[in-house]
Structure formats: structure tokens, C-alpha cells
Amino acid sequence: MALAKFHCIHASTPRKTFPYKWIVVTHVCSHWREVALSTPELWTTIYLSYVKPEVLDVFLFRSKHALLRIDGDERGSVESAAAAFRPYIHELARAETLFITAPAEIYDTLAAHIPPSASHLRTLVLTGIFPGTAMPSLLKRLSTPSLTQLILSQCSPDFVENMFPASLRDLSISFAFGDHVGVDEAFPALKNLSSLEELSISESHQHDGGLRPSDPGTLQLFFPRLRKLRLESTSLSAARFLKHLSLPASTAVSLFIQHELAAADVLELVAPLVEQLTTRIDPMDKREAVQLVKVAPGSVQFFTRSPAGFFSRPDLQVASGRMSNPLGVLLRYLCPRLPLRQVTTLSLEGVSYDQPMAWKPFLRVLENVEQLNVDANSRGPRHSDIIGLIGSPFDPNAEKCEFPLPKLKRITLRYVKFNSEADEVMQTFIAEYRSYAAVVARRDALVDGLYMAVVARRDAGSCAVIEEINIERCQNMNEYHVRALEKFVDTVKWDGLKYYEEGVEEDEVAHSESDEFEDDEDWYPA
């Protein structure tokens, strides 16, 4: 209440006139002070480690029988942690939310003295301190029939059946730093969690590869209400986990693969991922084919429907930030084996088309893509990436040229930089299409490159006509580029935004205003 009153004071009021402590003392009238003192819900947040014991006693007294939110973060010695926690262990019985960060020994102390039942507890967050771990002894001791959210961080539990309450809706487990535990080891403990809506399991980033073997046998789990599954592990652990798991069509699956991947490792994931994308759990399962694929640095995302918004959640995401060449491995060995024949939209976000041989198997599968979205940043795609993707055939020496995305009709460019010179790769591309070289390097390298790509695809006779180009939030863009593109594309949509990078003047870009351009019908010959 005092804080609320403090924020009502005008921001320009000097602190010397209205110091914060003075407001606390004087700006709450006797009526509201009495209301505050007699309202238990205002005194239910208990910080065991940051507040003096006498203050905690006052809070506990004034909260009466209201449910508590207890936060105990003790990163010091075991003795100091025990001194902070022990006097209040009996209060845990009326905790609704409990956060504990402490050495492993503290969890054993709590387990030995805590009341056997915490019937009101709904959220429990236990975090170990390296090199200690959040041990499961507290879970074994404590009965939590109402628990809906459990987060275990830096922990090394021995997973056994029924160790988690059936009421859980959100479960997150992060194994201890350097521990030899795979995500598949948690499998037995997940039995009978039919109410689970979100599940996240993360292996240690620093184990040395010697994971303990785990074999769930014939056990098969089904979480009918699961909305999100996140696994951070090796590909082998993830594959073993998914092999014994059936998920609803609405479940969003995120796999973050650790360590270097070889082709054999990726192939382990193919079967369980195909199963997830295609197998109907029951006749009411509304599983749809993948419609959109996004390729971003270190990750590939799959959507069964076009995302409604910028932050829409993919149905499946496979990522790795710890590999020297994650995209090359994923695109070459995983994606071509997934059911992607019905994909109609491909999005590239900040990636470069700098490994055509790695992309080739992936692009061959995407034979029905009609829409290409390109979101550029400092990492790519460069002009040559965009032109190389749509304008370079798989085999230039073949008798009949085959181009990537043969049914492509629409292209959307976002944050792409116009008005730049042809780079070395673009010049190589130009050399391959000498018949169109007359138009190159005289105007805009990107527009010229798009022209060459469109004409090359048209002349091949095996590709659909690119009918539409959309331009959104692009740099160094003006009316000239629209008119230039309209020379060889039926529809050009520009958002009208003029944003010039530092050092580029509008006059420098607006070379379209010359009469020479308006009269030159042969600038982009049909």
C-alpha cells in the first residue's frame, strides 16, 4: 500500500521533499493501516534468507492461517542455510508456493523434519547448488496431493514409479552439472501422470558422454493433455524417449540436441519424429500434415498450419547450438526423411545458403512450396543466397535443368538490404548467365539477380511463374525498385517504408527518377 502511494507522487517531486521512508510512515491513514494489519493475505510472502527473523515472525503472525508463498534462497554454507530454514520448517505445512535453493544436505534436513503432508502446496521449485544437487529425499518424504507444478533444477533423482503426484500439470527436470543421466531415464517416473500439460527434461551440458543405459522395455506412455514437450539431450536419449511415447496432435515438441551430430545420430531421430508427425492416436486425433517449414540458425521448425502471429509455436522444433554445422546435418540427413511433401511455405530467417550440397536433399523434398519468406539479418541471407536458392539449378550441366522449389509463385522479403553491389558469389552467378549480364551491376544487384533467376526458371520450362513479390521493412528501398521489379513480375507489393542505412542518402538510392529509366523498355527484356 505504501508502494502504491509512493508511485502516486509526481515523478518530478524531489526525493529530499518526499523521501520513501517518510511516505511509508505518514501516507497511509489510520483506517487503511488497520485494514493492512488485519488482512492476512498481505503478509503471505515469506523470504527466509533476506529478511531478519523478527520480521519473519511478524509476517507469520499477521498472515494468520492464510496460505504462504515461501522463498528460501540460501547459497552460503550448510550451517547458515540450516539456521535460516530450521526455525520455519513447521510453517511449510501451509505453503501454497515453495521455492528452495540450497545445498543438497539442506534437502535431507528438510525431509527429516518437514510435516508429512503439504495438502495446500501447488507449486514446488527445488534448485541445487553446484557441486551439490537438489536431492529427491524431500519428495519421498512429502505428500503433496494438490501439487500442479514441480521444477527440479540441478538434481540427480533416482527415478522410480509413482514418485511424482498424479495431480501434476507442469513438470520440469534439469539434471545436475556433469551428471551421467539421460532424459530417457526419467521414463519410469512419468507413469500415471495423465494430467500433465507441460513436460521439460534437460540433460547436463557437461557430461562426458558416458550416459547410464536405460531401457523402458515395452512400457508405452500417453499424455492425453500434454501441450508442450521440451527435451534437451543427446539425439540417442531423445530417440529412446520418444520411441515409447504417444502424444496428441496438439502437442508442441521441441528437441534441443547437445554435442556434435553424425549422420547415424540424426537417423536415430527419424522414426520417432515421423511417428509423431503422422500417427493418429485415436479416431478423434486431428493430426494434420506439415504446411510450413522455418529454417533459422541452428534450428528447423515445422508447423502443421501457417502461424497466425510472429510468436506462434511450432508443432515440432529440432535445434542445436552446440554443433559446428547444425543446419548442414539436420537439413541433409533428418529433414528429407520427414513427411514434408505437402509443405507449401518455406521461411528462411537469418541463415545463409552457403552449403548447397547440404541443402539439396532438403529442397528436393519441398516440391510443392508456393511461398518463400526471407527474413534477413547480419548473418544472412545475402543477396547471393536468395538468388542462388531460387536461380541455380541442382545440376547446371544436366540436359534438363531442375530448380529448387519448382512450384514457387510468391516471395516475401523482410529486412533485406537493397542498393548494394554484387558480391563475389553473385558475380559467379552472373557468369553462368552471360546472356543476361548486360543488365547486371548497372542498377541494383538484388533486383538484377531476381530478374535473372525469374528468367532462368521460366526458360527451363519446368517451373511455375513467380507471380508476386512482397517487400516489407527493407533497407534502401524506394519506388524505383518497385517499378524495376514490375518489369518482370506481375504483382509487386511494397509497404512504402523508406529506411536508409547509415551513410546511404535517399538521393543516392533514388536513381530511378531519371528519364533514361522511364524510357528504357529494354532494361529488363522479356
Image: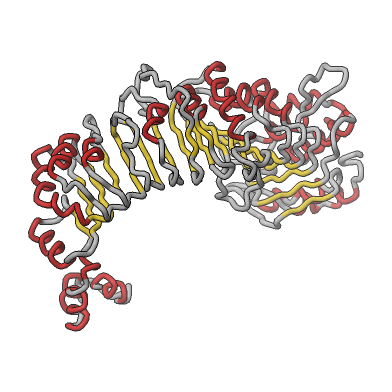
265 with respect to 287 (left or right): left
Q: Where is residue 268? Give x, y as percent.
A: 54, 21
200 with respect to 99 (left or right): right
Residue 423, located in which quarter of the rendered image? top right
Quadrant of the image containing the C terminus: top right
Residue 341, located in which quarter of the rendered image? top right
Q: Where is residue 280? Give x, y as percent.
A: 63, 37
Q: Where is residue 525? Give x, y as percent.
A: 90, 39
The relative height of residue 88 versus residue 370 in the rendered view (above or below) is below
Residue at the spot 59% in from the left edge and 47% down from the top edge: 503
228 with respect to 300 (left or right): left
Residue at the spot 7% in from the left edge and 60% down from the top edge: 54
Residue at the spot 69% in from the left edge and 44% down from the top edge: 418
Residue at the spot 49% in from the left edge and 30% down from the top edge: 220
Residue 442 in view: no
The relative height of residue 377 versus residue 398 in the rendered view (above or below) is below
Of residues 80 and 352, the one nearer the viewer is 80
The relative height of residue 214 versus residue 287 in the rendered view (above or below) is above
Its colouring scheme is secondary structure
